[in-house]
Image (spheres, grey):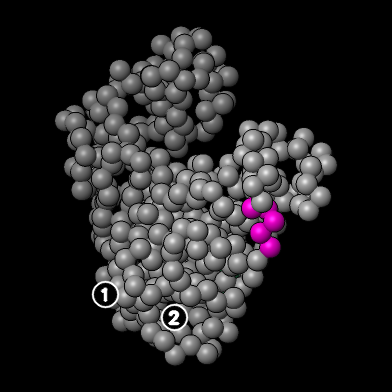
């Protein structure tokens, strides 16, 4: 591998420019004839992304790939969570990419194989893993070719498919991903105990359950209430039950577990707002378990289309935000007062509400514009 970029002088220059504006840097001439400014900026960008997304790579001599590969990588936080679920002898990642998932997910395995079609990227991963003293077999090929020749059996096969269209159009169908999981699912289930597939949070869960066979587990993983991944687990046997976990990392909320199908057999109770209201976290909302959450926590829902819940007694272990509230009249809203404005199942967006009532954003208080069964209401935190 060409490692001119690791030359100490160039590395010093990279480290000295970690906070420099990259656009202006790109307009300059590279001070080193043997590397372009673009290559230097790629390394600076990599270190900047690593600070937030994968700090374990902030080490000397680590090389970073182009921005698209950084964007496609998982974060250290979600990878670490997934790593706790997986264990066995042989692990293979068929879409290794920059190898963040593979690095963590393979922690509890003895033999690790990485498959990646992009040779430049795999070379970088191989170099970095050498620095990190992590051993693996690196295969630069298309996974379809690997599967054609493969005779080995794995405890876990992991895939994090890429979006086929690089123009960032959001695609939600499994057929639009590379590889096409629908086409290879049978083959994958034949060579492993467990097939684990990371998917976009935008994927529709009902669609997923209808097109993939052998699903026995689904993880909906959020970090600080931002849903980052939907991870689906397939086994050889067709499972009768699918366990679903809604997770909100970096919060003090515990994991909410339910069985796929529970929601359909559950009805919610309804009420006008009582002393406390509850706004579920986004992994719960993604799971669509709107009635189940009411039943499990003994809470009443405000309206069939308002996913806000209420009770007179506080339920502390609710996975989401809990507020003590009162219902107010629009006339009680003072101009220029400061609130966090929430609009749920309400015709106006927070920005429009802010303008209409002359409010300022922020502070500790909440103002929630929503609908109960009686109609439009405004709820204020106390
Ligand atoms: C989303 S990235 C994986 C990121 C990785 N999980 C991480 O945490 O760094 C997907 C990778 O799969 C690779 N890929 C897509 N289709 C492939 C195929 N048919 N065979 C081999 N690699 C493939 C792409 O080149 C890309 O690097």
- Residue 338 to residue 322: above or below: above
- Give the mark nearer the N terminus: 2 vs 1: 2
Task: Identify the image quadrant of the N terminus.
Answer: bottom right
Q: Position of residue 102 (x, y in %)?
A: 45, 64
Q: Position of residue 96 (x, y in %)?
A: 52, 67
Task: Identify the image quadrant of the C terminus.
Answer: top left
Toward the left, the furthest residue is: 313
Numbered range of the magenta stretch: 2-6
- Residue 45 to residue 100: above or below: above
Q: Position of residue 95 (x, y in %)?
A: 53, 69
Q: Quadrant of residue 364?
A: top left
Q: Secondary structure at mark 1?
A: loop
Number of labelled discs? 2
Q: CA distance from mark 2 to mark 1?
A: 20 Å
Q: Quadrant of residue 49?
A: top right
For discs 2 and 1, the disc positioned in front in the rendered view: 2
Q: Is residue 4 rendered magenta in the image?
A: yes
The crowd level at tag 2 (other Cα within 10 Å; few <14, some 14-19, many 20+) is many
Q: What's the mark number on residue 240?
A: 1
Magenta segment's dominant SS is: helix
Q: Position of residue 367 (x, y in %)?
A: 41, 22
Q: Secondary structure at mark 2?
A: helix
Q: What's the mark number on residue 188?
A: 2
Q: Quadrant of residue 89?
A: bottom left
Q: Residue at x 63, y 56 (%)?
A: 65
The crowd level at tag 1 (other Cα within 10 Å; few <14, some 14-19, many 20+) is few
Toward the front, the furthest residue is: 8
Q: Which one is in front, 194 or 89?
A: 89
Visible in this render: residue 74? yes
Q: Residue at x 33, y 39 (%)?
A: 251
Q: Is residue 8 rendered magenta in the image?
A: no
Ligand 1 lies under 8 Å from the Cβ of mark 2: no
């Amino acid at each position: 591998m060409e490692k001119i970029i690791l030359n100490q002088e160039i590395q010093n220059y990279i480290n000295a420019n970690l906070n420099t504006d990259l656009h202006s840097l790109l307009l300059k001439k590279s001070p080193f004839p043997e590397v372009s400014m673009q290559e230097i900026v790629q390394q600076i960008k990599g270190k900047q992304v690593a600070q937030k997304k994968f700090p374990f790579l902030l080490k000397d001599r680590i090389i970073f790939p182009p921005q698209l590969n950084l964007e496609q990588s998982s974060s250290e936080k979600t990878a670490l969570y997934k790593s706790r679920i997986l264990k066995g002898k042989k692990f293979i990642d068929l879409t290794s990419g920059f190898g963040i998932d593979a690095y963590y997910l393979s922690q509890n395995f003895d033999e690790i194989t990485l498959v990646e079609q992009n040779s430049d990227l795999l070379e970088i991963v191989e170099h970095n893993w050498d620095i990190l003293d992590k051993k693996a077999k690196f295969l630069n090929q298309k996974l379809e070719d690997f599967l054609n020749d493969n005779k080995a059996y794995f405890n876990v096969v992991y895939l994090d498919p890429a979006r086929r269209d690089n123009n960032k159009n959001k695609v939600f169908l499994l057929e639009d991903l590379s590889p096409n999981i629908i086409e290879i699912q049978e083959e994958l289930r034949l060579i492993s105990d467990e097939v684990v597939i990371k998917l976009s949070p935008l994927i529709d869960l009902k669609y997923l359950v209808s097109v993939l066979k052998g699903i026995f587990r689904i993880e909906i993983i959020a970090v600080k209430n931002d849903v980052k991944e939907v991870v689906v687990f397939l086994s050889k046997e067709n499972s009768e039950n699918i366990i679903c976990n809604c997770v909100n990392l970096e919060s003090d909320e515990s994991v909410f577990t339910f069985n796929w199908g529970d929601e359909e057999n559950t009805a919610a109770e309804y009420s006008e707002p009582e002393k406390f209201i509850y706004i579920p976290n986004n992994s719960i909302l993604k799971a669509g378990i709107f009635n189940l959450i009411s039943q499990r926590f003994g809470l009443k829902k405000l309206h069939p289309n308002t996913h806000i819940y209420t009770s007179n007694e506080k339920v502390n272990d609710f996975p989401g935000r809990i507020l003590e509230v009162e219902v107010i009249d629009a006339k009680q809203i003072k101009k220029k007062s400061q609130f966090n404005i929430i609009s749920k199942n309400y015709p106006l967006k927070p920005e429009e509400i802010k303008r209409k009532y002359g409010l300022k954003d922020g502070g500790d208080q909440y103002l929630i514009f929503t609908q109960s069964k009686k109609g439009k209401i405004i709820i204020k935190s106390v």
